[in-house]
């Protein structure tokens, strides 16, 4: 349990209540924040509510919080209008990895926030400077890259843009520590630190599978047992989503060159709808979520 909850922002907004957004909401709820998740419509908002409250209930059952599910739930709400973020100290954008979609989302959110509020993107690859360049207050904007699944992941990557206020970076360190995770700070660069390295490994694993070097299971086992990775690169790609990884690889290929060019196997599997855990099949078979 966390002894530094008082450093968490009092009011946190999360735009997007999918797996990542729900995990972010869960983390701040357990750290003592009031959290609002905004989704695109009522059905998506209801699904986000269920996702977050189920995750909270699991934490209560595991005794990773001293609070009851009712107490945690009382600090949580969902909405369909970014106007509900007014008064937030921090809003984290967690929409899909698409530049135009993120720009639209961030500009709409910034318009309802106070001048001192912080705005963050959970992007795993898109340039923070490119996003900041479309905002009115780029000094109050930075990247907060959480990892999937958020409740079980120890790391948050703080991405500092060229215009990000240094004081905001230090605030963000405190927030990350308050939710019981370890911060690292990186300067804005394509793929930052974690995605650039992780995608490089994942793409090479896909090429090896494509070339018949070994089975998906054996490639993953090589990295788990040989290099002490908690999960193999192909299983991790399934968890992230093959479509998500393809989008990141395409972006990195455009920024950094052919070494990030997506393998044909990855493109084919995405075209066939084999997206990983969320569809029940990727490089491994899963129970569909």
Image (cartoon, grey):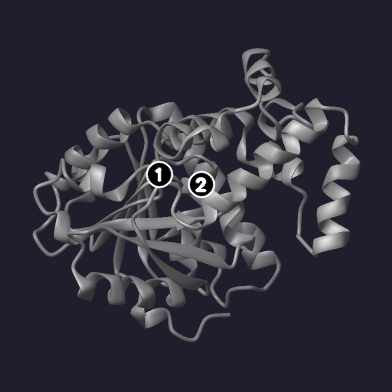
- Secondary element under disc 2, as helix, strand or loop, is helix
Residue farthest toward the bottom in the current orientation of the protein: 3
Mark 1 and mark 2 lie on one chain; the one further toward the N terminus is: 2
> How far across and how far down the image is residue 162, in percent?
21, 59
| Residue at x 45% of width, y 77% of height | 177
| Residue at x 43% of width, y 71% of height | 176
Q: Is residue 31 visible?
A: no
* Front residue of this view, candidates 133 and 82: 133
Q: Is residue 160 visible?
A: yes
| Residue at x 64% of width, y 62% of height | 152
Per the image, the residue denoted by label 2 is 20
Residue 52 in the image: above or below residue 212: below
* Front residue of this view, candidates 37 and 147: 147
Image quadrant occupied by the N terminus: bottom right
Q: Quadrant of residue 63?
A: bottom right
* Front residue of this view, candidates 170 and 66: 170
Residue 94 is marked as 1
For the residues labelled 1 and 2, say whether their Cβ atoms are less than 8 Å apart: yes
Q: State how far apart marks 1 and 2 are (Cα).
A: 7 Å
| Residue at x 66% of width, y 20% of height | 264
Tally of marks: 2
Residue 31 in the image: above or below residue 204: below
Mark 1 closeness class: few <14, some 14–19, many ≥20 residues within 10 Å: many
- Secondary element under disc 1, as helix, strand or loop, is loop
Mark 2 closeness class: few <14, some 14–19, many ≥20 residues within 10 Å: many
> How far across and how far down the image is residue 150, in percent?
56, 56
């Amino acid at each position: 349990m966390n002894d530094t909850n008082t450093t968490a922002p009092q009011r946190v907004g999360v735009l997007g209540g999918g797996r990542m957004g729900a995990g972010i909401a869960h983390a701040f709820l357990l750290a003592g924040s009031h959290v609002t998740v905004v989704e695109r419509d009522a059905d998506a908002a209801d699904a986000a509510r269920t996702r977050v409250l189920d995750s909270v209930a699991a934490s209560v059952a595991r005794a990773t919080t001293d609070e009851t599910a009712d107490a945690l739930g009382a600090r949580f709400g969902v909405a369909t209008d970014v106007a509900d973020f007014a008064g937030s100290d921090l809003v984290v954008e967690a929409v899909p990895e698409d530049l135009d979609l993120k720009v639209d989302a961030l500009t709409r959110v910034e318009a309802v926030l106070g001048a001192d509020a912080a705005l963050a993107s959970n992007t795993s690859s898109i340039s923070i400077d490119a996003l900041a360049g479309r905002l009115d207050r780029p000094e109050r904007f930075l990247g907060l890259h959480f990892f999937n699944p958020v409740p079980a992941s120890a790391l948050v990557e703080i991405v500092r843009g060229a215009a990000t206020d240094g004081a905001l970076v230090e605030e963000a360190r405190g927030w990350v520590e308050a939710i019981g995770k370890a911060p690292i700070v990186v300067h804005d660069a394509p793929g930052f630190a974690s995605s650039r390295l992780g995608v490089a490994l994942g793409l090479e694993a896909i090429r090896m599978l494509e070339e018949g070097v070994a089975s998906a299971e054996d490639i993953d086992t090589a990295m788990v047992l040989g290099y002490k990775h908690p999960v193999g690169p192909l299983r991790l790609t399934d968890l992230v989503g093959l479509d998500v990884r393809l989008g990141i690889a395409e972006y990195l290929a455009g920024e950094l060159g052919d070494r990030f060019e997506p393998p044909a196997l990855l493109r084919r599997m995405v075209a066939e709808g084999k997206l990983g855990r969320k569809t029940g099949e990727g490089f491994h078979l899963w129970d569909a979520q």
